[in-house]
Amino acid sequence: MRAAIRADVRRRARAARRGTSPKPVPSLPNSPSTAYTTPTHPVPGPNPTELTQTTLARAKQYILPVYARPDFVVVKGAGCRVWDADGREFLDFTAGIAVNALGHADAGVAEVLRQQASTLLHASNAVYNAPAAALAEKLVTLTQVAGGLGYVPSAHPTTAPGAKVFFANSGTEANEGALKIARMAGKVRGGQHGKKHAIVCFAHSFHGRSLGALSVTQNAKYQTPFEPLIPGVRVGKLNEHSGLDTLIDEDVCGVILEPIQGEGGVNAAEAGWIREVARRAREVGAVLIYDEIQCGLYRSGTLWAHSTWPADCQPDVVTMAKPLANGYPIGAVLVRDAVAEVMTAGSHGTTFGGSPLACAVGLHVLGRLSDPHFLGHAAETGAYLLARLERLAGWFPGVVEPRIRGRGLILGLVLPKAGHPARLVELARERGLLLLTAGSDCVRLVPSLNVSVAEVGRAVDVIESCLGVMSSEPA
Ligand SMILES: Cc1ncc(COP(=O)(O)O)c(C=O)c1O
């Protein structure tokens, strides 16, 4: 309740600064919703259309079965909603796994795609292209103003020190690039030492599926079948202070972490711990990499989840991907000049990274996401979502833990009983709401950043109804 009042005060203060009156936010309910107790969207559906049946049959016969997915076929989207091939509407609180920050089928994104695709879609990295240069500049100048990568928030971009961008095609590829930059810096900085190539990562992290990124993704389910992985990877524990000096020693060339772990359970790194990690990385000359692929680009409320941290807690390298082009594939590595200078022509590259099409879309998306009115709206809906989620533990004690993880619009509802997160996701889907699990004990809410208060209200009503169902199920 206190959080809700704080949120309301913040909202009114923001509205006063803008000279507008705050939009009315619904008051918080006094009891949990039971409006969605009965399933409305069973999966598989009762009368699958021809399209559903042929798509499922083809996919099962011809697509490599690496994904566990329920038997329904998504055919179109609009904003925070998607429709299946049987015509049923779902409220999408997954945003394509934290990707569609502007929602599905955004008209502005579609128009940029149309224009750029009919002008210059791909050109190769043997030549310069204007959208890539403009997007790189935008990423650096926005970071200089909003804070991050060693810049404290400031009203104006600065010219020194500078930063450079490498464009890739996915989150994994961005992290792969960042790890290679750390290796290269280790070679250059290691000098006579000659063995500065160890990399430090942290338990429950997720950095991707290529062999390099997988080697720092500490999850036996993903790693074991593909061992041996790259040597020299050390694993620490998030927010554990003891042993940091031995974990990060002179042999370490890079330290990679997520400021807010996404897949691993929406676990936020604590400021005091981050300061120690950053201090030690600097002491031994290791490149500090923050993977903001899921939590970055305004999802946590600021440009980067680390934007408001003090400069001594900030990284040398930031990786990003998911929402940068609202679903069109893109990844990027943002590097301080002092580290970027170790990379030279030919030391890294990619065919598709930095294509005019991906970068034109990225430029458009970043312009929209960074608009103060857009961010004010996302802050309001995020505060309302948090306030609604904070009530759940009181109504469902023993099922939901009181502390909500994460911030902004990356929030985690903790359900400590084994199997409960997956059960909630399943029950919600049967009632037309798409959610994700995270780690072993968490349901993750990562809707589009332009989700409306009404959509948040409906989603939480569904969650409350499902928790009611779960509470009456045998243990
Ligand atoms: C934090 C983080 N890093 C890296 C990745 C990998 O990104 P991609 O799936 O685009 O390769 C993900 C994907 O979920 C992620 O959440």
Image (tube, helix red, strand yellow):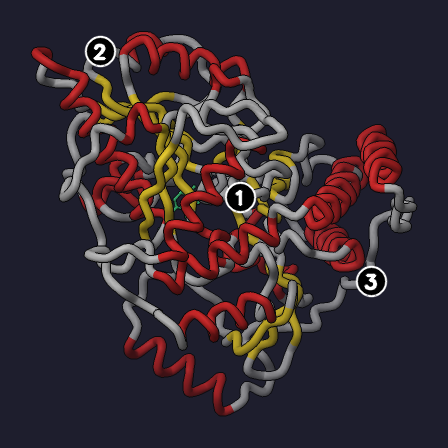
Query: Image quadrant for the N terminus?
Result: top right
Callout 1: 10 Å neighbours few (<14), some, many (20+)? many
Q: Residue at x 51, y 44 (%)?
A: 438
Q: What residue type is labelled 2?
A: Glu
Front residue of 373 and 392: 373
| Mark 1 within 8 Å of ligand 1, using the beta carbon | no
Q: Which of marks 1 and 3 is in front?
A: 1
Callout 3: 10 Å neighbours few (<14), some, many (20+)? few
Secondary structure at numbered mark 3: loop
Q: What residue type is labelled 1?
A: Leu
CB atoms of marks 1 and 3 within 8 Å: no
Secondary structure at numbered mark 2: loop
| Residue 86 position in % (x across, y down) | 59, 83
Q: How far apart are marks 3 and 2 (CA)?
A: 59 Å
Disc 2 designates what residue? Answer: 250
Front residue of 98 and 217: 98
Q: Is residue 205 above or below residue 95?
A: above
- In the image: residue 128, left or right of residue 132: left
Q: What residue type is labelled 3?
A: Ala
Disc 3 designates what residue? Answer: 35
- Disc number placed over residue 384 in the picture, else none: none
